[in-house]
Image (spheres, rainbow, N blue to C red):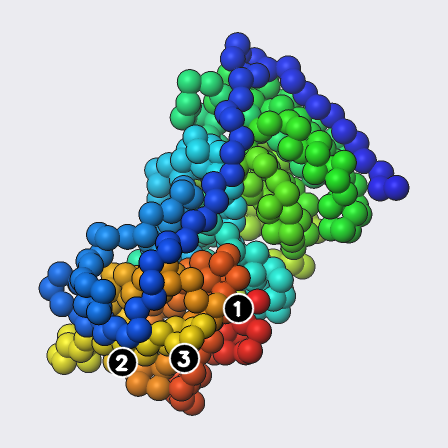
Amino acid sequence: MLPVELRTSLRCGRSGRADAFAAAEARESRAAEPAVASSSCAATTSASIQTESGAFGANDLLPTPACVDDLARDVYCLFGVPIDVTDMALALRRIEASVASATPFLLSTPNVNFLVQSQSDPAFRESLLDSDFCPADGMPIVWVARLMGLPIKQRVSGSDIFDALKTHPRFERPLRVFLFGGLDGVAAAAGKVLNAERSALCCVGTFNPGFGTVEDMNREDIIDTVNGSHADLLLVSLGSRKGQAWLHRNHIRLTIPVRVHLGAVLNFVAGTVKRAPRWLRACGLEWLWRIKEEPELWRRYCYDASVLLRLILTRALPLAITNRWHRLRSARQPTHLLIKTAQNHNSVTIDLCGNATERDVAMALSCFRETLTAGSKAVIIDLSRTCVIDQRFFGLLLMFRKQLKRRRAKLRFTGVSAATKRIFKLNALGFLLTPDASE
């Protein structure tokens, strides 16, 4: 048996902290409209799409019950990881929407360590790709994005999000938090601190699963304990690799709406580790403070820094030069993306003709929505006439893949030239070209 320490704390500092939102999981619905045999999507001033079944514009979007519309997310691909362009206000609104509607919301906070792990661990990368929100947690990510000309201009860290939830009430009652993981006694100490404060968060339970494997932590009694807390926010602290894996594998089994792995937050709240001063965080030097507080981290930081430097030299710089060149060329000779679709028996083929860039995302998004409503088991994207794919369009493709995956449909690419294959590899998306990429 796995040694565990269970502490369920229902002691709250204000009246009304024991009230609960009704738990309900929204389900994806599919439209029963007949599939369109073929269609052509061209960029126009209204960004409309002409099909044999009629015309619809960018505002005629497929309604979904979920609080997050993946295709509408402003996502950029950075080294194979989706990064949302966001600020603190938007992040809090997304969390608030999930809690209010009781819909699952997997929040991941990619930092340099996340980027590094995603390069060699497909399962870890998949946990990020399947997340519902991925703000940049770390100034190095912001700096690399600026180098590549991407509009990711600010850091929205998990620790800052948690502090904002504490200090800015979003509801008439405090949000209920369940703390899972951490070193022995840390979660319980953090829970006591939260409940002693007059804040917008209330700890309704803690659980220390020990040092077992992810499989050990998937036990039915553990999941029942977590769900039985009726919390609004599940904060996990198991180490990034194990924490992301546990959240990813138990996504359907968990009923708490907002789930996030924030490894250091428990230590900050409990007071076992002091957080870096605000000015040091703004300079991107929080890692130095972390090494001062936790000297054992220096090896990880050195390794992550060496991998990041290699990624910058071999991928970010070539992409930065390529992006700059295509922007200058596009300014002198504007081109438009033409999208053609063809419905086969059990699949849809989407032909991208021209440059697939940020300016064409709105039109492509509408085409992708139409494809999702068709309910096909496979989608084939023909890139034989595609010249350029930028990081914003790759972000859209990653969100399209996520939606297809949820519908148990597969995404394949065909007509990939050597030059296009190089673009995929520079963006750390070579895995998309493998046969089982969408599984």
Q: Are marks 3 and 1 in contact (CB under 8 Å)?
A: no
Identified at 61% across, 66% down, the residue is 122
The answer to whether residue 98 of the structure is visible from this angle is yes
Identified at 88% across, 41% down, the residue is 1
Identified at 43% across, 67% down, the residue is 376
Q: Is residue 53 left or right of residue 411?
A: left
Q: Which residue is mark 3?
A: 423
- In depth, the one of 379 and 142 nearer the eye is 379
Q: How many neighbours does mark 2 have within 10 angstroms: few (below 14), some (14-19), or many (20 or more)?
A: some
Q: Which mark is residue 353?
A: 2
Amino acid type at image mark 3: Ile
- In depth, the one of 380 and 389 nearer the eye is 380
Q: How many neighbours does mark 3 have within 10 angstroms: few (below 14), some (14-19), or many (20 or more)?
A: many
What percent of the width, then of the height, locates residue 288? 56, 50
Q: Which residue is mark 1?
A: 438
Q: Based on the displayed image, in which of its 4 quarters is residue 39 positioned? A: bottom left
Q: Secondary structure at mark 2?
A: strand
- Quarter of the image with the C terminus is bottom right
- The vertical placement of 28 against 44, above or below, is above
Q: Is residue 234 left or right of residue 59?
A: right
- In depth, the one of 432 and 285 nearer the eye is 432
Q: Give the foreground label among 3 and 1.
A: 1
Q: Give the foreground label among 3 and 2.
A: 2
Amino acid type at image mark 1: Ser
